[in-house]
Image (cartoon, rainbow, N blue to C red):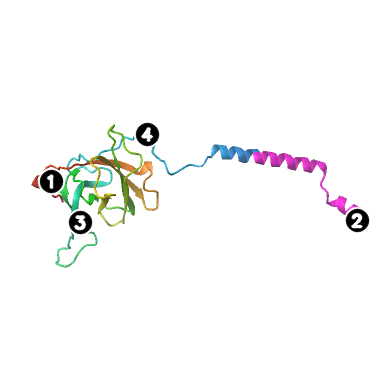
Amino acid sequence: MAQDVSATRLPRGWFAVGVVCVALLHEQVGIAKDLLPPKAQESTEIGSTQSPSFDYQEKDIPQSLFTWIKMAKGFEVEWDTFGRKGWYTQDPRLKPIGLGSTFTPEIPAIYIVFEVAPLEDPAQFAVQWHLEKLSGQLNEKPLGKDVLEVSGHERYGYLELKRSGEKWPVGNYLAKIYIAPLGQQPFHAVNHVGVMRFTIADTVPTWSPEQKSVR
């Protein structure tokens, strides 16, 4: 019986090698943890960022993926035809109504209407809006968000900025626009493509006939 037990024992040298290997492995794992700390996805923007403004656009000059992008009180849906009455395309054309950048506190929602070049792959268009403080700084927490998925064959879309209470607080606002591939986090800093500004005021200037609609 004693011979059987001694036969299964490892030499002392093997035990020492095993202890050294375990120690080295533990040290390497510790280093790996230090080199690859977990990355938080909640906060991706640090400080202020300078982004293109879509408020001022030159005719026939696209910005980002947008052929044009407008802020309006609403929109109409128009259907293109193939030249024969009753034969329609699958992509409706959106026509902004009531263009402007100043709105009354009672307006239920503000719309960002846009046209893009034909997309090869589906994409997400997103917006989040912030109220500016008296100091000119933005509130860190957005007042609202909206995300729209646009398939490959579509060219038109809109984002809806809904008021969160009975009325919009009077003040200046900044809307951040994002474009992301389908399935990615839309509000990541790398997907931020531009901004639009608008104002909520008790009185709104009168729009000219040219500003009331656009194709």
Q: Residue at x 12, y 42 (%)?
A: 205
Left of 118 or right of it: where is 78?
left
Q: Nearer the viewer, mark 2 or mark 4?
A: 4
Q: Given the current orientation, which residue lies at the most extreme bottom position?
A: 86
Q: Which residue is mark 2?
A: 1
Residue under label 3, please give it: 93
Nearer-N-terminus badge (2/3): 2
User: Label 4's element?
Assistant: loop
Report the amino acid beneath label 2. Met
How busy is the neighbourhood of tag 4: few (under 14 within 10 Å), some, or many (20 plus)? Answer: few
Count residues near mark 1 (Cα–Cα under 10 Å), then give few for <14, some for 14-19, many for 20+: some
What's under tag 1, amino acid-wise?
Gln
Residue 11, magenta (yes or no): yes
Q: Residue at x 62, y 41 (%)?
A: 29
Q: Real-space Cα distance between discs 2 and 1? A: 101 Å
Question: How far across and how far down the image is residue 15, in percent?
Answer: 78, 43
In x, y percent, where is residue 206?
A: 10, 44
Reply yes or no: does residue 199 show up in magenta: no
Quick check: marks 4 and 1 in contact, CB under 8 Å?
no
Instruction: Give the residue type that dot 3 points to.
Output: Arg
Please give the name of the residue rendered at 33% of the width and 38% of the height, measured from the top-left corner. 139
Residue where numbered disc 4 is placed: 47
